[in-house]
């Protein structure tokens, strides 16, 4: 096992947080950036708590995968305010590209988004 593989294995063995969870998403798309050959991942959905903070968190890899996984993570700071609210989050994906594209991972499943489908204007 290489040093990188060992380090990643140790990282994955750390305890998981109690305040963060994968959450559902409804739409996900890759949009072209302003500069040629740059891309932005945009994800939309409905969060189950008004004060839930939603982030897109890329997975860690040793080698470039076919589809780079990006998790839709909700973090609840303190007491949850039980009211639903729409959310839209985005993430530049220039440094986290899979060979084929991005895979968005949420509580309700995943969606693969190939870069071939994205057209620059």
Image (cartoon, helix red, strand yellow):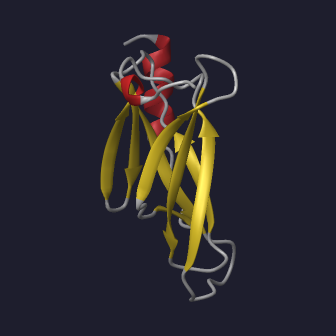
The picture places residue 1, in percent across and down from the top left corner, at 37, 13
56 left or right, relative to 68: right
Please provide percent x and percent y for residue 13: 44, 41
Residue ranking furthest to the left:
109
Give above or below for 8 relative to 56: above
Q: In which quarter of the image is the C terminus?
A: top right
Apparent side of residue 52 relative to residue 65 in the rendered image (left or right): right
Determine the residue located farthest toward the top in the rendered image. Answer: 2
Q: Can see residue 16?
A: no
Q: What residue lies at 69% left-to-right and 72% top-to-bottom?
A: 77
Q: How far across and how far down the image is residue 74, in percent?
A: 55, 63
Figure quadrant of residue 94: top right
Q: Where is residue 64 in the image (x, y as percent from the top left)?
A: 42, 17
Residue in front for this viewpoint, 2 or 120:
120
Q: Is residue 110 visible?
A: yes
In the displayed structure, would residue 68 be above or below residue 89? above
Q: Residue 93, relative to residue 14: is it above or below?
A: above
Instruction: Decide if residue 50 is on the left or right side of residue 104.
Output: right
In the image, farthest residue toward the front: 121
Taking the spot 38% from the left edge, 17% from the top edge, the residue there is 99
Q: How many badges with numbers are in the image? A: 0
Q: Which of 34 and 75 is in front in this view?
A: 34
- Quick check: 83 above or below 19? below
The residue positioned 33% from the left and 22% from the top of the image is: 66
Q: Is residue 81 left or right of residue 4?
A: right
Residue at 63% across / 17% down in the picture?
36
């Amino acid at each position: 096992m290489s040093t990188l593989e060992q380090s990643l294995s140790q990282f994955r063995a750390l305890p998981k947080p109690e305040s963060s969870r994968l959450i559902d998403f409804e739409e996900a798309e890759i949009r072209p950036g302003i500069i040629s050959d740059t891309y932005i991942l945009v994800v939309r959905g409905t969060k189950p708590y008004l004060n839930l903070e939603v982030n897109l968190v890329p997975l860690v890899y040793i080698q470039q995968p076919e589809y780079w996984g990006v998790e839709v993570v909700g973090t609840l700071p303190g007491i949850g305010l039980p009211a639903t609210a729409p959310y839209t989050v985005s993430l530049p994906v220039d440094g986290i590209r899979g060979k084929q594209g991005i895979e968005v991972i949420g509580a309700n499943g995943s969606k693969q988004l190939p870069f071939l489908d994205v057209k620059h204007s």
